[in-house]
Structures are given as C-alpha cells and as structure tokens.
Image: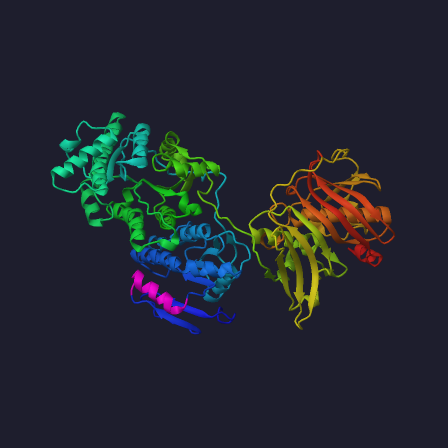
Amino acid sequence: RLVAAGWQLRVLRLPGVPQRISGGADGALSSWGAGELASRLEELGTDRVHLVLGFAAADSLAWAEGVRRLAHTLLIAKHVVGPLTAAAATGERAAFVTVTQLDGTFGLGGVAEDAVPAGGVGGLVKTLAVEAPELFCRALDLTPALGAGEAADLVLDEVYDAAAGPVQVGRDGVRRVALTLGEEPAAPSADAVPLTSDDLLVVTGGGRGITARCAWALAAAHRPGLLLLGRTALGEEPTWARGLTDQGALKAAAVDQLKQADEKPTPKRVEQLYQAVVGEREVRETLAAIRAVGSEVEYLAVDITDAAATAAALAPYQERITGVVHGAGVLADQLISAKKAAEIERVFSVKLGGLRSVVAALPADRLRHVVLFSSVAGFFGNRGQSDYAMANEVLNSWAAAWKRSHPQTHVTSLNWGAWDSGMVSPQIKAVFEERGISLIPEDTGVRLFAEQFAPERSGDVVTVLGPTTPLSEREQAAPASPVVLERDLASLIGEPLVADHVIGDAPVLPAAAALGWATGAVERLTGSGVAEIRDFAVHKGVIFDDSLDGSRFQLSFDPTPDGAEADVAIRSTTADGTVRPHYAARVLLGGGARPQPERVTGLPALGGGSDAQALYSDGTLFHGESLRGLRRVLRDDESRLVIECGLPEHRPAGGAFASSRYAPGTADLLLQAALVWMRRHRDTASLPMSVARADLYEALPDGEPFVVVVEPVSANGTSATVDVSACAPDGHVLLRFAGLSLVSTPQLAAKFASR
C-alpha cells in the first residue's frame, strides 16, 4: 500500500525475520545489539524520514522474545526521533506509528500471556507524543481476526489521520476505540472472596518505601500473613553505625570506617555504606510495625529478577501462599533520545521479569489475590519515563490476561498517581502544584490500597488511583504552514444528517455540517478549541447525486503569518480535474473560553405558544424526521421569532463534523429557525448563504430543550440578514450566528412542499 502511494520505502528486518518486502531498500539485523541497530539505521538513510511504521509484535512469540522486541522498539524510537523532529520542523508531516495485533482493545480484553508484552508499546508512543509534540504519534492495536488487506487499510487510515489524538487507537474492522477512564467502578466478581488472616501474601519490594507502607496498612486492615521480598540483605548492624541517627553523623562515621580499612572515602562509597545502614533499618522498622498491628511477617532477601533464586526462596512457603502484591520497581528516567539499553533492561527486569519470576514459582490455582503496582506514567505517558511507562502498560495487559485465564482470582493493576512522599523532590512537587496536579497524601494512598482488597473492588482489573490528570501533557502547537486534508463524503449518504436533508430529489450537505467540518478539523489540527468563525460562505452546496461520483473533497487550512487565524476552504476535484469551491471561512485559533455575552431577556416560558411541527408539513421546511427539532413557536413577531427546540445530536463519521462546542444537528436548528422567519415575514423560501460571525460558547444540549431567537438586522425583497441565538431557557447564550445571510429562492418552494 505504501509503495503504491508513492512512498520511498526502507525496511528494517528484525533478527530471525525471513520475509523480504519488494519495493524498498532492505536492511536485516543479525542480532538485537544496540550497536548493530544504530549502524543499520544509518545505512538505511533515516536522516530524511517522514514515517516510521513499527510492527511491534509477531505471532507465537515467547514472553522473553516479546519483552526483547519491546525494548528494541524503544531503541528504534531513540534513533529516529531526531530525524523525525527535523522533518517536522520544515513544516512536513512526520509520524511514528506502531501496530500490534492483540485484540483491538490494547490487550485489555484479555489475551494469551505470552502476547502481553506487546501491550507496552502504547506507553512508548504516549510518552513520545509528550516529549516530541510536533510529531504525529499513534499506537494502533488491531484484532487478529482481520485479514492482511483489511488490516493494511486500517493502518493507513491511522497514518493519514488529520487528528493528533487519540494517540492510542484500537480497530476491529467495525469499531474504532480509544482508552479513557470509566465513570463508575467495574461490577465486583460474583465469587469474590475477602482477604483474611488465613491468607499469606508475597509482597515484592515490601521492605521499604511506599510498598512497605502499603503492606503495613494491609496488615492493619485485614491481618494477612506477609512475606516481604527485597534486595536489601539483613545482617547485624555494623559497630561503627550503632547509636547514630543523624545523617551527617552517620556519613562521618562511614568516612572514618573507610579510612580505617585503608579505602579512599569517595562520595560514592560513603553513600553506599550510608544507604546500606539506612536500608536495613527501614526494613527492620517495617517488620516491627507490621507485627505491632497483629500480622505475621517474614522478610526474604532475594533478587526477584533471578527466577531460580526466587523459586528457591519461595519453595518452603509455596503451598501456603494465596496472593501476590508486586510493588517492586526501579526508575531510570531519561528522554527517549538519550535512552540506553542497560537502563531499559534494568527497568524491565524488575517490573516484568520480577513479576514472572514470582508467579512462576507459585501454584496458579492457589492465588486468590494478585495486585500490581502500575502507574499513570503508563496510562497517560510521561516525559522522561518511556521504559517505565512501557513496563507499567504491560502490567495492565497482564492483569487483563491473568483475569481472563483465572476468573476466580481478584486481579488488579493499580495505576498510581504521584505520591506526596520522599520519591517526589521539592522541585518536581512545585511543578505539579503549578500545573494543578495534586499528589496522593501517604495516609490516603495506603488507605486506598487496603480498600482495594475488599470484595466489592474485585472487578477493578485496571484502576487509576489518585489524581486523574497526566503527570506531563502534550503541548500541541497549531501548524505554521498550510495543511490539506482529504475526506471521502460518499459514506455520508447513509447518515440521517444527510439522508433527512433532501431538497427536491437529492440529499444536500447541511451548511451547518460544513461549518462543523471546518471547526472540527481546525480543533483536531491545533489541539485547542474553536470559539469564533468569521465570514463563513456557501459557494456551492455539496449535492449527493451523480455529480459526486469520483469527486475528491479537500479542506485546506492556511494560517495567517501571526498564527492567530486561519483561512479554511472546502473544495472538490471532479474526475475530469475540475475544481469546485464549496465553502470558505476564517477561523480564530487558540480559542479558549470566551466571555459570555449578556443574557437574552424577555424570553417566553417553555411549553407555550403553538406546535412547530406543522412547519415540516406546510412547505416552510423540507427536513426529514431526524432533523425535526423545532418543537414550539413561543413568539412570532417580525422583530423577534422565538422557537423552543430540542434534538438528539447527530455525530456522523465519528464526530468529524463536530467540535468540542459545536454539533451539526442541533446547530442546523438555528438555520431552520431563520428559514421560518423568512417564510413567515417575507413569504418566501430561502437558503442560508453566509454567516458573518459564529460565536461558540457552549455545546447545545443533546436532546434537551433550548430556545432559538431570530432577530432581523436588515431585509429587502430578495434577501435578509438576521442574528440567530441559541439560548438556555434562562437566556444564557450558547451559540450565536451573527449576520446570517438568507437568499430568497422562490423556485424551491415547491421542492420544500414536496418533502
């Protein structure tokens, strides 16, 4: 498909992949080494690259192979982010797109456990979108049921998508889904069992830090037995450190100890001795605190990345263990462009290898509780934490996979926000406060953790705990150079918005939909809301008849030099090359919330006046059933027409003709009301031709009543200009078309009446 579209192709074949792709330069890797990868990418000429399309999984990969591919994908991103960013700086489209075939829902529907590591690629792409916002970033997951041709079409649909978001998309050939937070918790499992003193839980990383505090809270709430695993080896405290608690005094004693041992007291060695003492003390304090609240607890010093050592350590307890809390993890924060293979390995080995080591050492059918410490860094992506985000996304997919194969187990992946603890420096905390991100207080966090073991939480397979705000956000900028978007309109013929907008014998695209197309496209291109559109003009409506066959429709976005506004034009090119202008507008960019205008006063109460449905049968309006949202005429004066309205919203093409404050179906009611004014007070059929200014304040209510007010500005025998406002019943203005121009079209009166 890419070759047919004219792309120059470079193919990087991973080790063991025999398939060659014709039409492009071929580069084969013989190993997974970082050095060979860098050399091969340089040979392929990635200094000028506009699209990186990474297939991040393959059929029947073993877990370890999947993790290795996942790490390799991050290294590829490291090498291409620079060239892609350079291409984007010239105003060209530059994209990083990954493709997986889990289940079309990011592995969250539950897949085979060995397939789970591919789910981590979303954490990479979401982090890349934060670190390099000028790039188009997309992590696409397809259902394996798709054929290759259909899958390729869906991949290129996403590659060419005009909208920068969502970054994570799932496709199954019917639905297109994104990932967001549910408003309500999942229903609990029918066979959920409570945590009791008869349970024995393994807690990785449980001797120190946040996980240790959570283990104490769990003991206080439920009294289970706890088996804490950690890397800190417990022994007798060295003589030189006994009785010393002050940091300065301890480090001074460490310096003396090193000198006595004829070892140079470098800052690194002093810190090592100091941390060893502090770490052992913290583990002992954790054990004492847990015993004090009534739980039995033991501590095992073991490296959980060593599967054999982990199995040996757990063997004596194997038949008693009923649950796992995987809280261990390490950080190696660094931008993607500076990531090192060793850092990725360190992060993955603890988070992913550690989990597998512990679970493999235990009888799966005995596990009743499995709780994983994941992070919002994976759920949202987070600057500088690509490998950590990837590992935590794998935990989310693993939880779904384990729950599917072990439905009797309470499995939860806890995506924690940032804790207000020693892990967050004062500088980072200040940044969070400036962005309005609240941290999780320690007492709140440990309470939430303990509550997660209640039977009523047993349905929470993937859960976000704490603030639901991303730790770092993508700063999407508006394009500084012209952009052309292309859309196939043929599929709209089956949408009620078009099928019920027929003039004469042919459906016609509503002007309100064209305005929504422009508004929605600008919002998706710029990442910010649109609040004002000026000089919207209808040059030639889009008629769904034979003339549409073979036509290509394009929307052009041309920003002004100062970046404050953009000219938008919608044109079509016919099969013979004829270009037809259809609509034009100027859109104000960077539109935040606008100051509300004064309320419209003197509005009649809802429910009065006369039934407006007759307007659809007496030739005043031509609109079909799904667009008949004018309910009652509340006032009918030449100086002011007031109509009560309400309509379930239309969002054709997945919302492509709508924006955050605008939807075409309800907006069309403003145009309908203007046509009513012309019929009532100029006795003529008419059509809208232009809008001097559209002010978008708030979205119109979906299916709920609102009021439309039409007030004339000027009129003559063949045309009129009116202001049309959509208001809440209390006069609060939601949407206003100022300077709406109507042109008398007497020849259409019969066509209106025929509808």
Q: Residue at x 77, y 60 (%)?
A: 504
Q: Position of residue 73 (x, y in %)?
A: 37, 58
- The colour scheme used here is rainbow
Q: Nearer the viewer, residue 543 or 580?
A: 580
Residue 100: tell me if it is visible. Answer: no
Q: Residue at x 37, y 43 (%)?
A: 374
**Left or right of 710, for residue 444:** left
* Quarter of the rendering containing residue 45: bottom left
Q: Nearer the viewer, residue 316 or 690?
A: 690
**Left or right of 691, for residue 245:** left
* Quarter of the rendering containing residue 640: top right
Q: Nearer the viewer, residue 40 or 748?
A: 40
Magenta stretch: includes residue 609: no
Which residue lies most toward the left here?
Answer: 261
Q: Quadrant of the C terminus?
A: bottom right
Compared to residue 588, the image places residue 256 above or below, namely above
Compared to residue 335, the image places residue 198 above or below, namely above
Q: Nearer the viewer, residue 393 or 411?
A: 393
**Left or right of 165, for residue 573:** right
Task: Point out the stretch of residues depicted in magenta.
Answer: 31-45
Q: Position of residue 79 (x, y in %)?
A: 38, 60
Which residue lies most toward the right here?
Answer: 717
- Total residue callouts: 0
Compared to residue 240, the image places residue 109 above or below, namely below
* Quarter of the rendering containing residue 337: bottom left
Q: Position of residue 448 (x, y in %)?
A: 39, 33
Q: Position of residue 31 (x, y in %)?
A: 29, 64
Magenta span: predominant SS is: helix
Residue 522: tell me if it is visible. Answer: yes
